[in-house]
Image (cartoon, rainbow, N blue to C red):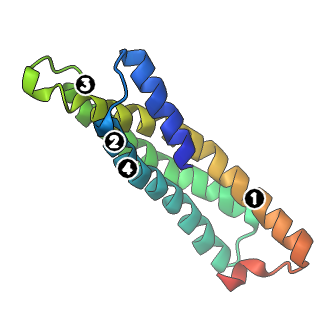
Amino acid sequence: VIPFGLIGAIGGHIIMGQPMSILSVLGFVALAGVVVNDSLVLVDFINQERAQGMPLRKAIEEAGALRFRPIILTSLTTFAGLLPVLFETSLQAQFLIPMAISLSFGVLFATFITLLLVPAFYSILEDLRETCVGNKHSHKRA
């Protein structure tokens, strides 16, 4: 999921017309933490539901429905909190703008990709596990 955040961050630099800098890379590091957290929230919820005996598809649907709002709100508040830095014109804030661009645009893009791809990849990996291993109760292992 981290590469999708990087795509959003690079796209943000293009949109804002700012060159990449070493502070952009520091923004990537912060971005990786936020994106991984969003993914963990979904995967952990799916695992909890499956541990209680819920079927895979239903657990994925429940995770998407019940974790959608917290994930979106967390990401939107992060983006909104960085907006003043993005549009700051003072000389003192100019060095922070590349980091804010990386973090804000990366979070926006990666959040939507996370909400779509993490459940899909989880389902695909579980199907492969059941097919290759032949163990239909592999979710109880976690």
Q: CA distance from mark 2 to mark 1?
A: 31 Å
* Residue type indicated by callout 3: Leu
Residue occupying image coordinates x 49% and y 39%: 6
Q: CA distance from mark 2 to mark 4?
A: 5 Å
Q: CA distance from mark 4 to mark 3?
A: 18 Å
Residue 31 in view: yes
Q: Quadrant of residue 22?
A: top left
Q: Secondary structure at mark 4?
A: helix
**Residue at the disc numbered 4:** 29
Q: CA distance from mark 3 to mark 1?
A: 37 Å
Residue 52 in view: no
| Label 3 with label 1: CB-CB less than 8 Å | no
Number of numbered callouts drawn: 4
Residue positioned most to the bottom: 141
Q: Secondary structure at mark 3?
A: helix
Whether 80 is drawn above or below 3: the answer is above
Q: Secondary structure at mark 2?
A: helix
* Residue 116 percent location from the top left of the image: 63, 43
Residue occupying image coordinates x 36% and y 41%: 25
| Label 2 with label 4: CB-CB less than 8 Å | yes
**Residue at the disc numbered 1:** 123
**Residue at the disc numbered 3:** 86
User: In the image, which is nearer the foreground, mark 2 or mark 1?
Assistant: 2
| Label 4 with label 1: CB-CB less than 8 Å | no
* Residue 32 percent location from the top left of the image: 43, 51
Give the mark nearer the N terminus: 4 vs 3. Answer: 4
Closer-to-camera residue (25/88): 25
Q: CA distance from mark 4 to mark 1?
A: 28 Å
* Residue 133 percent location from the top left of the image: 88, 78
Give the mark nearer the N terminus: 2 vs 1. Answer: 2
Quadrant of the drawing holding the C terminus: bottom right
**Residue at the disc numbered 2:** 27
